[in-house]
């Protein structure tokens, strides 16, 4: 466990000059290499007061030297209880800060840049959780620069009414502002602004993919990395009507009433409502994933990006058809849904399976429950006679397919049609120490990768912020995964002599072959993806015209 996230730093100082002024960070040495660290760098003005529910504006210049040795405040959110115990970085609406981790500068040498967006369902988490020591150890020693950012979350980041009073997507605008700042200033840290890879995990992966599609941001970077999410996920983008009603309900809960005033249009009333909400204390807008029915009962996010006519000016399928393709890495954990099963205390049994089948039958056009059950049996096998563990495994696999795997399959299918290299993975391993006390809520316990397992091995960051002692198998994965990803950031190809010496060769998607790298202690290519389930699911969805967008499990 990282102690208090290393807030107190006693290390040699280092300085860099950016557009707004001079920054002072510190040097952290690891494995004989010096790394430069700058924490809590403002990339935009504090989005408070009249700037609440507005696009970010550039930070004002400062005089003198600004010390950047502590993480900036986290976005407003309702913490998981384990975060309350461990995280010492406070929350604030003033949260638009980024962190720069770079190899020690050398005259005439520049480094490629990995711009990383944290996940958390657009409602929670922060860049502070990743610390700096492990970041330097895992990635900066591989001769790349990493920039981690924060953006507005929850209602403050994605409040949307669907009109000019509040179009929403403020969190995405924050990400673009940080990306533009990076483009302008990364050379001050020895970075090459023409070699920029944008990546993220979960909601951060969705964000990276959306930024690659948006006409506003797609030309700002060259490559992307998506871990545990993409724009193909049904939870990536919200339905405007649903999110608008969700936000208006929040306003009413905070006391908003028209008070008998006469408004000519809905937009006029909404503008008055936004003015009212700008007066509310920021902490009133915090959101919690646990207990949110949209997340665990309907498998969707209540607050996420929307098609706003600006960042996302058209449906995603239209944007994909016009956006220039980029080299990419993408993938999921083998049991991707296990994290949500644990967090939602979901009972993976016959009743749960029947509920999912019933909902899908209702959504399908022309399918009875019996027909849907037969279709599910064809894909996942007969559940009759299965013991509790086998039945739970089927539930986890089905939920994984619906939440992430089918979207990953669509991502791969698109990759087969473009000329840029796409490298896909399946993280088939995780640490036995990942779960901590949450192990009690698992339907069964196996060392299979799940949502957020990538963080363990790429950053040595545990979602549950519990101690993470690594055994020999963990260390093998924590050695190979950063090498592969850093190679991709540097060269657009994850392979190198070092990875081949470790017995790993990662082949890209081919026009006639979907294939993934199984990342585990003995990583190898898998030529059959998801055991053939996705092709059968695809036929099922098309046969019954099942709409996979927005709220796949909503009754």
Image (tube, grey):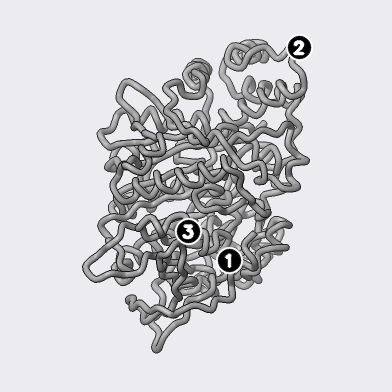
In-image side of 299 versus 441 (left or right): left
Residue to which mark 3 is pinned: 137
Vertical comparison of 71 with 253: above or below: below
User: Does residue 341 appear left or right of residue 142 in this picture?
Assistant: right
Image quadrant of residue 281?
bottom right
Instruction: In the rendered structure, find residue 385 and report the number of the disc placed on it.
Output: 2
Which is closer to the viewer, label 2 or label 3? 3
Residue wearing tag 1: 74
**Label 3 neighbourhood size at 10 Å, few (<14), some (14-19), many (20+)?**
some
Which sits earlier in the primary sequence, circle 2 or circle 3? 3
Real-space Cα distance between discs 2 and 3?
A: 49 Å
In three-dimensional space, the C-alpha distance between marks 1 and 3, rounded to whole angstroms, equals 23 Å
Of residues 463 and 468, the one drawn nearer to the viewer in this rendering: 468
Across and down, in percent, residue 192 comes to: 27, 61
Element assignment for label 1: loop
Residue 462 on image: x %, y %:
61, 51
> Between marks 1 and 2, how big is the CA–CA gap?
49 Å
Give the quadrant of residue 241: top right
* Mark with earlier residue (1, 2): 1
Q: Is residue 408 above or below residue 118?
A: above
| Quadrant in which the N terminus is drawn | bottom right
Q: Residue at x 45, y 28 (%)?
A: 409
Q: Which secondary structure, mark 2?
A: loop
Q: Is residue 270 visible?
A: no
Q: Give the crowd class for mark 2: few <14, some 14-19, many >=20 residues within 10 Å.
A: few
For image coordinates 54% across by 33% down, the residue present is 428
Quadrant of the image for the C terminus?
Answer: top right
Q: Earlier in the sequence, mark 1 or mark 3?
A: 1
**Which label was assigned to residue 37?**
none
Q: Residue furthest bottom?
A: 64
Q: Residue at x 67, y 15 (%)?
A: 369
């Amino acid at each position: 466990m990282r102690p208090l996230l290393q807030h107190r730093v006693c290390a040699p100082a280092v300085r860099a000059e950016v557009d707004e002024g001079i920054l002072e960070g510190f040097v952290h040495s690891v494995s004989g290499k010096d790394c430069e660290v700058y924490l809590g760098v403002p990339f935009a003005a504090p989005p408070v007061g009249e700037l609440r529910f507005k696009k970010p504006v550039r930070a004002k210049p400062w005089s003198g030297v600004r010390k950047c040795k502590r993480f900036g405040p986290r976005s407003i959110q309702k913490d998981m209880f384990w975060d309350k115990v461990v995280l010492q970085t406070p929350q604030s609406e003033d949260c638009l800060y980024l962190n720069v981790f770079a190899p020690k500068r050398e005259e005439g040498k520049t480094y490629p840049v990995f711009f990383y967006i944290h996940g958390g369902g657009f409602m929670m988490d922060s860049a502070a959780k990743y610390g700096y020591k492990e970041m330097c150890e895992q990635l900066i020693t591989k001769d790349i620069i990493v920039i981690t950012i924060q953006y507005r979350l929850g209602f403050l980041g994605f409040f949307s009414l669907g009109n000019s009073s509040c179009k929403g997507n403020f969190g995405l605008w924050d990400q673009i502002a940080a990306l533009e700042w990076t483009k302008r200033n990364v050379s001050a840290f020895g970075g090459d602004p023409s070699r920029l890879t944008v990546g993220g995990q979960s909601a951060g992966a969705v964000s990276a993919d959306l930024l690659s599609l948006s006409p506003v941001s797609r030309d700002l970077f060259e490559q992307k990395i998506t871990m545990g999410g993409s724009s193909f996920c049904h939870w990536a983008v919200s339905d405007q009507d649903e999110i608008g009603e969700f936000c208006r309900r929040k306003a009413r809960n905070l006391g908003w009433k028209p008070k008998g005033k006469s408004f000519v249009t809905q937009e006029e009333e909404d503008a008055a409502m936004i003015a009212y909400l700008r007066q509310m204390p920021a902490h009133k807008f915090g959101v919690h994933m646990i207990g949110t029915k949209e997340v665990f009962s309907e498998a969707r996010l209540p607050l996420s990006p929307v098609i706003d006519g600006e960042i996302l000016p058209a449906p995603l399928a239209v944007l994909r058809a016009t956006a220039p393709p980029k080299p990419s890495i993408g993938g999921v954990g083998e049991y991707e849904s296990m994290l949500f099963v644990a967090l939602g205390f979901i009972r993976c049994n016959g009743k749960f399976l029947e509920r999912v089948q019933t909902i899908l039958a209702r959504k399908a056009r022309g399918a009875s429950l019996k027909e849907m059950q037969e279709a599910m049996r064809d894909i996942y096998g007969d559940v009759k006679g299965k013991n509790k563990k086998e039945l739970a495994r089927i539930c986890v696999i089905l939920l994984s397919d619906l939440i992430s795997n089918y979207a990953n399959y669509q991502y791969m299918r698109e990759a087969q049609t473009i000329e840029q290299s796409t490298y896909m993975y399946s993280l088939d391993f995780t640490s036995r120490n990942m779960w901590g006390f949450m192990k009690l809520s698992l339907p069964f316990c196996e060392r299979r990768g799940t949502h957020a397992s990538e963080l363990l091995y790429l950053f040595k960051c545990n979602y549950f912020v519990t101690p993470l002692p690594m055994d020999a198998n963990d260390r093998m994965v924590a050695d190979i995964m950063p090498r592969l990803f850093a190679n991709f950031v540097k060269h657009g190809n994850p392979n190198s002599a070092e990875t081949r010496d470790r017995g790993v060769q990662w082949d890209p998607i081919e026009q006639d072959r979907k294939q993934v790298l199984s990342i585990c202690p003995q990583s190898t290519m898998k030529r059959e993806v998801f055991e053939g389930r996705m092709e059968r699911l695809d036929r099922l969805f098309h046969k019954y015209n099942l709409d996979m967008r927005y709220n796949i499990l909503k009754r």
